[in-house]
Amino acid sequence: MQEKMTVVSHNLIARNIYELVMQGEITRNMQTPGQFVHIRVGDSSEFMLRRPISICEVDREKATLTCLYRADGKGTKALAKAKAGDAIDILAPLGNGFPVAAAKETALLIGGGIGVPPLYELSKQLNSRGIRTIHVLGFNSQEDIFYADKFAALGETHIATADGSYGTQGFVTDVIRDLPQTYDTFYTCGPIVMIKAIQAALPDTEGYVSLEERMGCGIGACYACVCKADNEHGYVKICTDGPVFKKGELEL
């Protein structure tokens, strides 16, 4: 669906990280965590392509949608200027999300940087099904951390920072190495180098990975986000075949 959603609030919550809350009827169609929205930045021709941003939280009662994004490019920096009451052109929901039903008793959720946001709605839905959640979140520094308290309210939460300014010094894999393996499934989103390390660290655990990728159209027409599959299918499109894939399905 395409809709001009109304900005409810728009706040800076960490270094260059913004929390954008919008309201509109499009939220009624959002069921699967891990899907994304395609946002048009402004009405001019300066930004021809939409920006793909993951869905962090959906409140169907209030008809609100929350997205977290990093403002580090011209488009996202322009988006950061939006204020309450503005209308933003949205295409959503797009892509295939995380299979919530795959978890049996305990799920390990692993996020890196801007790959953390889609895990929040996932954790909420897992909790609603009675699944215990363990969260391992990785950031560069304490200044980059967001939603730590929100995740902690849903389950056991561990933070790793590359510079050691908060939590465990190092990467998410350093935290995972010291965790007792009480989980039966893992879900992860973040940089490819992180996802590769997690798959190598958890070879015997069922898992699902969500890829961050630059996209042109977001609907599978432009072939800008193809990735080689580790099977007979050759290549897949991250925007329509993903962004979530089962562990081992892709050649990363």
Image: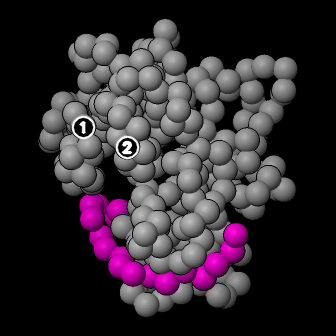
Q: What numbered label is drawn on residue 155? A: 1
Q: Residue at (69%, 74%) from the top-left corner? A: 2
Residue 220 location (% of width, % of height): 79, 52
Callout 2 environment at 10 Å: few (<14), some (14 to 19), or many (20+)? few
Residue 61 location (% of width, % of height): 43, 69
Q: Residue at (42%, 45%) from the top-left corner? A: 125
Which stretch appears magenta? 1-17
Q: Residue at (36%, 19%) from the top-left corner? A: 183
**Is residue 210 in view?**
no
Location of residue 77 with respect to 135 vertically, above or below = below
CB of mark 2 within 8 Å of CB of mark 1? no
Residue 218 location (% of width, % of height): 71, 58
Residue 53 location (% of width, % of height): 54, 60
Apparent side of residue 168 relative to residue 212 in the rendered image (left or right): left
Q: Quadrant of the N terminus?
A: bottom right
Apparent side of residue 135 relative to residue 89 in the rendered image (left or right): left
Q: Nearer the viewer, mark 2 or mark 1?
A: 2
Q: Quadrant of the C terminus?
A: top right
Q: Residue at (21%, 54%) from the top-left corner? A: 143
Which quadrant holds residue 152?
top left
Q: Is residue 31 magenta?
A: no
Location of residue 222 with respect to 159 vertically, above or below = below
Q: What numbered label is drawn on residue 166? A: none
- What type is the residue that disc 1 sits on? Gly
Q: CA distance from mark 2 to mark 1?
A: 12 Å
Q: Is residue 5 magenta?
A: yes
N-terminal of the pair, mark 2 or mark 1, is: 2
Location of residue 237 with respect to 160 vertically, above or below = below
Apparent side of residue 47 relative to residue 181 in the rendered image (left or right): right
- What type is the residue that disc 2 sits on? Ser
**Is residue 48 in view?**
yes
Q: Which residue is mark 2?
A: 128
